[in-house]
Image: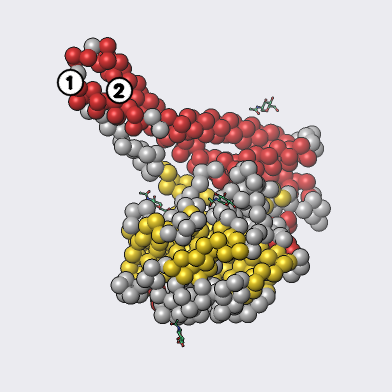
């Protein structure tokens, strides 16, 4: 008989990075959205060149060295992961070869195996086949990291030498090399995907606009090159949706067109997914899919049993009975029903028909939730909409289990009426007391190479 044991869980921290550069503070890496082709975009901003320092070059050099040291540390983490994975890959490959060999012998000499045993063996091999591309990918990752590591080592040597002979090397060239390395390292880490939320950055206020309650967002589908910003002010019986061409137009409040919805909305739980707005129709538990380009309603459907009309809102009220959201895994509705006694229910929705694909009962009372958002199939719930709120509860749809969490974040304007994760930008979009605010998230990744 054959069994494959999974390697120990492998850990990796994906860093939260700063959005806006403050060049005096050193090197900054811009966010990590994906472009139209699904590639990572990583931009590195160099520190200011003309610092009023007695010897700016030597200071910059010190920073470069520190940076290289930091990169080396990240590299060690990555290396540890790939090293362990590689061991696992090698073992698995060996096992597969053994099975394959047995199979060959068996088919050459069918009598050595009864038909049942033969079929079992064959099934095992078939099960293993999808693993092959995964194994290939790990080997490639491992090679890439080895190469990066060598470059980092080389670079620190050069830097050390240069410190002794200031001026002998071309500073600009050196700077370019560090920059390149950093970009590549970042994209390498970014590639490693989903994870568990462990931290939320400081708030980044993008704009102060609108009433106390509202919703704003960009398209949440991966991949998407749609950079428009959608703005929905108010929580009650509204119809007006503003569409800004880009984020910078939104910041300046210019270049927008208006959509007037056929059906008014309730709450602030709307989401834009693949060019359509999904929202809860006022005084009903109907979800409406409004297509922006054709300005038409493509489908509407009742979310069976879902409370509405302020029966089961979040702690802040505002007809927030039904919260729609999207993450890496697709479209979701968060709500509750009378049979669920007011505890949060999660349903995964089919984006074309709005049919419910699967439902989870989290057991967490919706009235004690400030807001909730989904990252990588996990629902995170805050315990209040007011100052002092924290991310208090997490429900894992992959294992249908929950845990209490204690992840703080700064609720700068003390009244959050919308909080949604955008999987494309890996950021939290929030509406806080008439301010449109973003947060970066830090995801802690547990990579389990799939065993048997
Ligand atoms: C290196 O990492 C440390 C600790 O994470 C940080 O404080 C420091 O600013 C980093 N240095 C540079 C140049 O990024
Ligand atoms: C390391 O630096 C030396 C000297 O600049 C260079 O000749 C060599 O090719 C470099 N090695 C790598 C792997 O970049
Ligand atoms: C379930 O998802 C969480 C968060 O995304 C992750 O940390 C965990 O490892 C996953 N569990 C399994 C069994 O895949
Ligand atoms: C996105 O929308 C397009 C049409 O606008 C459709 O063809 C495609 O299947 C949709 N993708 C998803 C994942 O819903
Ligand atoms: C919704 O609530 C309001 C105020 O509580 C009430 O007047 C109205 O009849 C309700 N509508 C529905 C459809 O339940």
Label 1 crowding class (10 Å Cα cut-off): few <14, some 14-19, many 20+?
few
**Residue 377 is drawn in which quadrant?**
bottom left
15 in relation to 277, above or below: above
Residue 91 visible in the current orientation:
no
Label 2 crowding class (10 Å Cα cut-off): few <14, some 14-19, many 20+?
some
The answer to which of 320 and 144 lies nearer the viewer is 320
Q: How many marks?
A: 2
| SS at mark 1 in the image | loop
385 left or right, relative to 148: left
93 in relation to 348, above or below: above
Ligand 3 within 8 angstroms of badge 2 C-beta: no
451 left or right, relative to 14: left
Residue under circle 1? 114
Q: Quadrant of the N terminus?
A: top left
**Residue 337 is drawn in which quadrant?**
bottom left
Residue under circle 2? 99
Q: Position of residue 89 (x, y in %)?
A: 40, 30
The answer to which of 394 and 424 lies nearer the viewer is 424
Q: Nearer the viewer, mark 1 or mark 2?
A: 1
Q: Position of residue 260 (x, y in %)?
A: 65, 72
207 left or right, relative to 337: right
Q: Position of residue 416 (x, y in %)?
A: 54, 74
158 in relation to 336, above or below: above
Residue visible at 66% across and 77% down in the picture: 210
Counting residues from the N terminus, which is met first, the one under dot 1 or under dot 2?
A: 2
Residue visible at 60% across and 44% down in the picture: 38
Q: Position of residue 153 (x, y in %)?
A: 60, 33
Q: Quadrant of the C terminus?
A: top left
Residue visible at 64% across and 60% down in the picture: 294
């Amino acid at each position: 008989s054959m069994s494959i044991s999974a390697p120990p869980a492998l850990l990796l921290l994906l860093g939260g990075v700063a959005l806006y550069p403050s060049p005096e503070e050193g090197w900054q890496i811009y966010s990590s959205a994906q472009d139209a082709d699904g590639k990572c975009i990583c931009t590195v901003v160099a520190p200011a060149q003309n610092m009023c320092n007695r010897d700016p070059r030597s200071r910059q050099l010190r920073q470069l060295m520190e940076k290289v040291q930091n990169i080396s540390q990240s590299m060690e983490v990555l290396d540890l992961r790939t090293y362990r994975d590689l061991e696992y890959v090698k073992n698995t490959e060996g096992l597969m070869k053994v099975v394959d060999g047995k199979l060959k012998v068996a088919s050459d000499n069918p009598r050595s195996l009864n038909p049942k045993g033969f079929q079992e063996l064959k099934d095992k091999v078939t099960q293993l086949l999808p693993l092959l591309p995964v194994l290939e990918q790990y080997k490639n990752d491992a090679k890439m990291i080895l190469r990066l590591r060598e470059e980092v080592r080389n670079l620190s040597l050069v830097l050390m030498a240069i410190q002794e002979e200031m001026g002998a090397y071309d500073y600009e060239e050196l700077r370019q090399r560090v920059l390149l390395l950093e970009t590549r390292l970042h994209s390498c880490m970014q590639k490693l995907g989903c994870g568990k939320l462990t931290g939320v950055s400081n708030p980044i206020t993008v704009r102060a606009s609108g009433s106390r309650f509202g919703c704003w967002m960009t398209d949440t589908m991966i991949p998407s090159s749609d950079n428009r910003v959608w703005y929905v002010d108010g929580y009650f019986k509204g119809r007006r949706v503003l569409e800004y061409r880009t984020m910078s137009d939104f910041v300046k409040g210019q270049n927008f067109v208006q959509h007037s919805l056929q059906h008014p909305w309730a709450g602030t739980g709307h989401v834009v997914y693949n060019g359509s707005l999904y929202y809860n129709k006022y005084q009903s538990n109907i979800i409406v899919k409004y297509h922006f380009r054709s300005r038409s309603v493509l489908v509407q459907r009742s979310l069976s049993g879902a409370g509405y009309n302020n029966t089961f809102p979040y702690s802040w009220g505002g007809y927030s009975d039904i919260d729609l959201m999207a993450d890496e895994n697709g479209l979701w509705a968060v709500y509750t029903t009378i049979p669920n006694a007011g505890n949060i229910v999660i349903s995964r929705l089919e984006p074309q028909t709005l049919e419910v694909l699967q439902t989870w009962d989290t057991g967490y009372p919706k009235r004690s939730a400030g807001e909730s958002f989904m990252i990588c199939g996990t629902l995170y719930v805050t315990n209040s909409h007011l100052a002092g709120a924290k991310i208090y509860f997490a429900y894992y749809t992959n294992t249908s289990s929950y845990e209490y969490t204690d992840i703080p974040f700064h609720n700068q304007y003390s009244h959050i009426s919308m909080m949604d994760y955008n999987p494309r930008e890996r950021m939290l979009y929030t509406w806080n007391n008439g301010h449109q605010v973003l947060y970066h998230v830090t995801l802690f990744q547990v990579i389990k190479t799939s065993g048997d």
